[in-house]
Amino acid sequence: MAGKITISDLVSAKSQGRKIVAVSCYDYTTARLVCESDVQMLLVGDSAAQLMLGFDSTLPATMDFMVTITAAVRRGAPDVFLVADMPFLSYQVGINKAVKNAGRFVTEAGAQMIKIEASQPYLDVIKAVSDAGIGVMAHIGIRPQSISKIGRFKAEATTAEMALELIALADQMVQAGATSLLIEGTATEVAEIVTKRYEMPVISCGSGAGCDGQILIAPDILGLTQGTGPKFTKSYGDLAKSTIEAVNSYSKEVQDGKFPDSEHSYHMKKGELERLEGLLKGRF
């Protein structure tokens, strides 16, 4: 797609059967590299609290932090469709506050859509933000911000009854004004049913191939994360190993006196060292 990607472009991609590729990233440098690929969507997720700050959940992400990193990603990728994640307690504290916080992502960070981890109590928030002219991606299925309440995550909609509940929730989100859906950790069959119900883009995060697009976090794609991750993650590189090897090579060169060498150092202009030595003799 030429020029800045818009929601209309993503809707067209769906209608034409073209898959949408989305990546979650959190910084300017990574965004610059990702936008050199054919990725159409970037999500600045509150998982940055874990991947960037080292917390064990997404909950410590704040509005100021999320706005700052979203603006950084926008500077790195000015033409990719940009979605910003509403962090914990940015929309649960009242409709007016939710609309104001959503607006910050648009006015201060250049986001084109905001994402809300959606459940029935927040339908009025979805509607209010949408009515304010801000695109909303409703995040259903596994919702990481609910970790304190449920204790641990498990796949969603794995029974017929659970599936009916999720499909009904998706319908409610769309009726409230959501213009996109993200379905996380949900049975493939159910995610596909939801996807076929709407003209809007439906993005899968661990919810199978039947959705309009897929999203993974950049550190997982690049192989920067270590240890066991969710079942649906996949690495397409091994930058953790490469990073360790590169830093070890740097460390060895420093210890061996090979870095910095003349090529990587600044030097005085010709004749200036001799002149400096003369000046030093007269003063010290």
Image (spheres, rainbow, N blue to C red):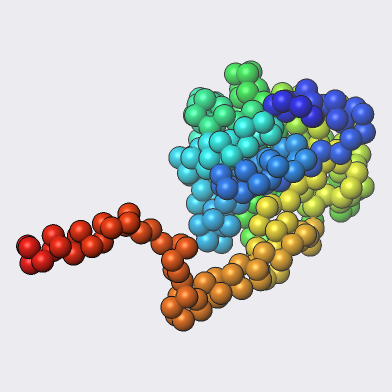
Image position, residue 235 (x, y; %): 76, 61
Residue name at image x 63 percent, y 18 percent: 133
Residue name at image x 76 percent, y 27 percent: 2
Q: Is residue 23 left or right of residue 282?
A: right
25 w.r.t. 98: above or below: below
Labels in figure, total: 0
Location of residue 9 (image quadrant): top right
Q: Is residue 13 or residue 62 the one in the foreground?
A: 13
Location of residue 83 (image quadrant): top right
Residue 164 appears in the picture as rendered:
no
Residue 246 appears in the picture as rendered:
yes
Q: Is residue 12 or residue 266 the one in the foreground?
A: 266
Residue name at image x 70 percent, y 42 percent: 36
Residue name at image x 57 percent, y 29 percent: 110
Image position, residue 136 (x, y; %): 67, 29
Q: Is residue 60 left or right of residue 207?
A: left
Q: Is residue 284 or residue 21 the one in the foreground?
A: 284
Q: Is residue 165 left or right of residue 144?
A: right
- Looking at the figure, which quarter contains the N terminus? top right
Q: Report the residue that reaches farthest toward the bottom.
A: 256
- Looking at the figure, which quarter contains the C terminus? bottom left
Location of residue 130 (image quadrant): top right
Image position, residue 117 (x, y; %): 66, 41
Q: Is residue 89 or residue 283 the one in the foreground?
A: 283
